[in-house]
Amino acid sequence: MAELLGISVAELVSGVSAGGRGLDVRAEVPLVSSVEAGNYTVIDNFKPRQQFETVPVSVPIKRHTYALRVHGDSMVSEVGDSFPEGSILIVEPEMAAEPGDYVIALNQSNETTFKQLVKDGGDLYLKPLNSRYPIKPLDGARVIGVVREFTKRFR
């Protein structure tokens, strides 16, 4: 692959060119269901499978990076960031989440949810952007991915 792109293997693996600037290599990741997102390790971008629709991305990807479609309106806001239903999220499960990040979390019932991770008084919460939905403590849920990019597909 490195030879085909005209770069070194180190540049390919790190995503950084020898000159120190990031490579502008576009890749594709699988678009998975919320159920598959909960078991993201089945996704292996270095051993592509034909069973998934793919989505182009412009952020660096790792072995388990995937795309997920937004369902519902809990992350729709009238001000600031907004993620309408049908938006496509590029999720990196191998990245540590920090307060302020948009994340995919897996609750105790093994259901995935997309929210903003916020911290208040030392406690972590999952916050929807739509004020009609409640903020919930992270409690027994666990963050399984950080949103790196989002797009909206029309067709």
Image: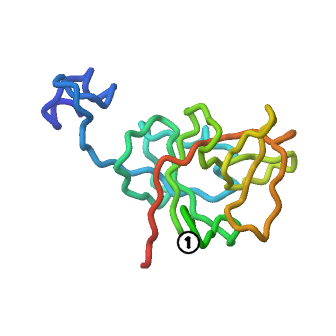
Task: For the C terminus, give its image quadrant.
Answer: bottom left
Q: Secondary structure at mark 1?
A: loop
The residue pinned by badge 1 equals: 86
Disc 1 marks a residue whose amino acid type is Gly
User: 117 left or right of 20?
Assistant: right
Residue 42: x %, y % from top left: 60, 41
Residue 64: x %, y % from top left: 52, 39
Residue 124 position (above or below residue 73): above
Foreground residue among 14 and 123: 123
Disc 1 packing (10 Å; few <14; some 14–19; many ≥20): some
Q: Residue at x 64, y 49 (%)?
A: 37
User: 143 left or right of 2?
Assistant: right
User: 154 left or right of 64?
Assistant: left
Residue 140 position (above or below residue 109): above
Foreground residue among 91 and 38: 91
Q: Residue at x 70, y 55 (%)?
A: 35
Q: How many marks?
A: 1
Q: Residue at x 67, y 55 (%)?
A: 114
Instruction: Say which quarter of the image contains residue 95.
Output: top right
Instruction: Say which quarter of the image contains residue 33.
Output: bottom right
User: 75 left or right of 24?
Assistant: right
Q: Residue at x 21, y 28 (%)?
A: 17
Residue 108: x %, y % from top left: 86, 45
Which colour assignment does the render follow?
rainbow
Q: Furthest-left residue in view?
A: 6
Residue 74 position (above or below residue 95): below
Task: For the N terminus, give its image quadrant.
Answer: top left
